[in-house]
Amino acid sequence: MILFLQKIRTMRILKSLFWAGLCASTWMACGDAPESPTLIQANKIHEQINRLSSDLHDRMMGEAAAIEKEMESAMLAGDSALALQLARVESRMSEWDVRFHDWSATVVEVPGMEDEHDHGDHSGHDHGDHAGHDHGHHSEVSLEGMSDAEILAIQEALLAELETLRALFEESLIEKPSNVE
């Protein structure tokens, strides 16, 4: 009988240890996994992309609004040559805007990183034809399952394309007639 009671006691101890171990392993699994340096770098690039793209788009929207006003003034003043030049610049900027939004749709989050960045408040400036559309910069595509190096390469490629878009925007401004401020 004593042997039987010791066996029951041992079973209870083992059962308690089993449940304690299961709870501990579950708790540890739910904790934050250490972030790799590669993913940290990818996230820094992603944050840079968000900041630069928001600033660039806001700048473009401001320039587009200014050109529109300048075109109206030129037309009212009877300067059709200036109005035509400005219309060409506006057309190139509209093409750029479409390309920017196509690029923006490809921006993807770094898996496991918090989405703490600000996508900018677009309610404080004139959107012209942009009123009501979403300025969120994130694709529905997930990078889950990709290697850290692949995720970093994607973020670097997105940044490189953004730099190309910035250069194209600057080219559009160079074509703006010099006597217009």
Image (spheres, rainbow, N blue to C red):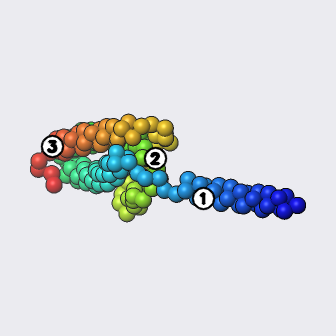
* Mark positioned earlier in the residue sequence (3 or 2): 2
Is residue 171 rendered to the left or right of residue 36? Answer: left
Report how many numbered discs are placed on residues in the image. Answer: 3
Kindly state the secondary structure of the residue where label 2 is placed. loop
The x and y percentages for residue 78 are 20, 48
Q: Position of residue 77 (x, y in %)?
A: 19, 52
**Residue 2 seen by the camera:** yes
Q: Position of residue 160 (x, y in %)?
A: 27, 39
Give yes or no for contact between labels 3 and 1 (Cβ–Cβ under 8 Å): no
Query: Residue 16: x, y in percent?
Result: 71, 61
Which residue lies at the image location 38% right of the left edge and 36% below the top edge?
Answer: 150
Q: Which residue is mark 2?
A: 111
Looking at the rendered image, the disc whose residue lies closer to the viewer, 2 or 1, is: 1
Of all residues shown, which one is farthest toward the left? 179
Query: Badge 1 is on which residue?
Result: 24
Q: Earlier in the sequence, mark 3 or mark 1?
A: 1
Image quadrant for the C terminus?
bottom left
Rounded to the nearest whole Å, what is the CA distance between mark 2 and mark 1?
25 Å
Quarter of the view holding residue 58: bottom left
- Residue receiving disc 3: 174
Viewer-nearest residue: 105 or 96: 105
Label 3 and label 1: CA atoms lie apart by 63 Å
Amino acid at pointer 3: Ile
Q: Is residue 22 left or right of residue 53?
A: right
Q: Residues within 10 Å of mark 2 (few under 14, many from 20)?
A: some
